[in-house]
């Protein structure tokens, strides 16, 4: 459940009260506050109907001034409210669109800390890959901040927010750019260890790589939409991006162009898969803008991004099959 507090002028309270009553909340109360000509309405609402309430209140107050809606999560309430019936639930989202957008925008912002974490995690990953240290590679994925821009791009496409798409794209490019640069510089300090299983595994581009990245992106988007911790799925996303990115930089620095091409292909494949699956999950969960016009723009942006991503994914999968057949032929010779 969530508690929704609405601060507004007294003259605007009637239309809001009508909207609240129509949605049959768990409980609600309105009262005057110390500020002159002001009221506060406090509503206790099931998660499944909270987004509908927020949209209804926002629409009712669209032409009004000096109002604010605040959402507060509720851990428990007594007496325990009745459970919504299946046909009563308006949404299966546990996180409001506004909450999700606020969290994603913060994580998808290009900051100095983001770049520093990207660089430090790459140092750990590159050394771990080159020394065949599994623990170091896992540790690097824990601190890599790459989940935010991936989800930001997908959510921006789902809501038709071009500003969020651009911001997330710049942040992701900045993080991966730092990772590639750091790994490239490390390659001059460490002799490349081609005997490392961890390093060489990032040159193996197979169809199971597609499944891994699709699962990681879908799990990340679903976790955010359900209001659950994104720490573990953040590690999954980093597993798809950081090690191949670090390997790509190491191979370029060592002028191992064939290996660099394979690890770069794996990195690009994983980015496309993560975006496709996150886009699909956000769409299936019904995350969309409030207004009809915004919904049409969001639908257009969604299909454009899905079409381009799916075309790239199909092309990459065909290339994987061709490379795999080529490797088998070479081994047969």
Image (cartoon, rainbow, N blue to C red):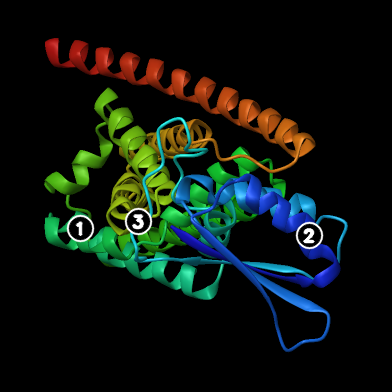
* Residue 216 drawn at (x, y percent): 33, 41
**In this view, the mark in front (3 or 1):** 3
**In this view, the mark in front (1 or 2):** 2
Label 2 Cα neighbours within 10 Å, binned few <14 / some 14-19 / many ≥20: few
* Residue 152 drawn at (x, y percent): 54, 51
On the image, which quarter does residue 174 sit in?
bottom right
The residue sitting at 27% across, 37% down in the picture is 203
**In this view, the mark in front (2 or 3):** 2
The residue sitting at 46% across, 38% down in the picture is 278
- On screen, residue 315 versus residue 320, left or right, reads right
The residue sitting at 62% across, 50% down in the picture is 53
Query: Seen from this angle, which residue lies furthest bottom?
Result: 34
The residue sitting at 75% across, 39% down in the picture is 294
- On screen, residue 107 versus residue 194, left or right, reads right
> Which labelled disc corresponds to residue 230?
3
Image quarter in which the N terminus is found: bottom left
Circles 3, 1 touching at the beta carbon (< 8 Å) = no
Say whether disc 3 or disc 1 marks the residue closer to the N-terminus.
1
On the image, which quarter does residue 129 sit in?
bottom left
- On screen, residue 53 versus residue 328, left or right, reads right
* Residue 28 drawn at (x, y percent): 57, 63
Q: Determine the CA span between mark 1 and mark 2.
A: 56 Å
Image quarter in which the C terminus is found: top left
- On screen, residue 159 versus residue 112, left or right, reads right
Say whether disc 1 or disc 2 marks the residue closer to the N-terminus.
2
According to the picture, the residue beneath numbered tag 1 turns out to be: 138
According to the picture, the residue beneath numbered tag 2 turns out to be: 14
């Amino acid at each position: 459940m969530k508690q929704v507090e609405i601060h507004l002028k007294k003259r605007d309270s009637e239309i809001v009260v009508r909207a609240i009553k129509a949605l049959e909340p768990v409980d609600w109360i309105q009262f005057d506050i110390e500020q002159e000509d002001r009221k506060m309405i406090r509503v206790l609402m099931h998660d499944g109907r909270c987004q509908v309430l927020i949209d209804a209140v926002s629409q009712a107050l669209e032409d009004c001034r000096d109002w604010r809606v605040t959402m507060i999560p509720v851990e428990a309430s007594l007496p325990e409210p009745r459970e919504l019936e299946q046909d009563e639930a308006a949404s299966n989202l546990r996180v409001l669109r506004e909450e999700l957008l606020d969290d994603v925008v913060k994580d998808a912002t290009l900051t100095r800390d983001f770049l520093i974490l990207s660089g430090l995690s790459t140092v750990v990953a590159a050394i771990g890959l080159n020394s065949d240290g599994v623990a170091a590679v896992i540790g690097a994925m824990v601190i890599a901040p790459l989940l935010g821009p991936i989800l930001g791009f997908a959510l921006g496409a789902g809501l038709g927010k071009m500003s969020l798409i651009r911001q997330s794209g710049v942040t992701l490019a900045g993080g991966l750019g730092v990772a590639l640069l750091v790994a490239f510089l490390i390659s001059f300090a460490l002799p490349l260890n081609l005997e490392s299983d961890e390093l060489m595994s990032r040159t193996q581009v197979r169809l199971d790589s597609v499944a891994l990245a699709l699962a990681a992106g879908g799990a990340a988007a679903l976790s955010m939409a359900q209001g659950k911790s994104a720490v573990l799925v953040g590690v999954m996303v980093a597993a798809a991006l950081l090690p191949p990115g670090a390997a790509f930089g190491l191979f370029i620095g060592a002028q191992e162009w064939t290996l660099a091409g394979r690890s770069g292909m794996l990195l690009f494949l994983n980015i496309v898969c993560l975006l496709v699956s996150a886009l699909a999950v956000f769409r299936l969960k019904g995350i969309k803008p409030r207004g009809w016009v915004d919904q049409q723009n969001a639908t257009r942006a969604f299909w454009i991004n899905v079409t381009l991503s799916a075309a790239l994914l199909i092309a990459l999968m065909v290339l994987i099959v061709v490379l795999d057949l080529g490797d088998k032929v070479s081994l047969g010779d």
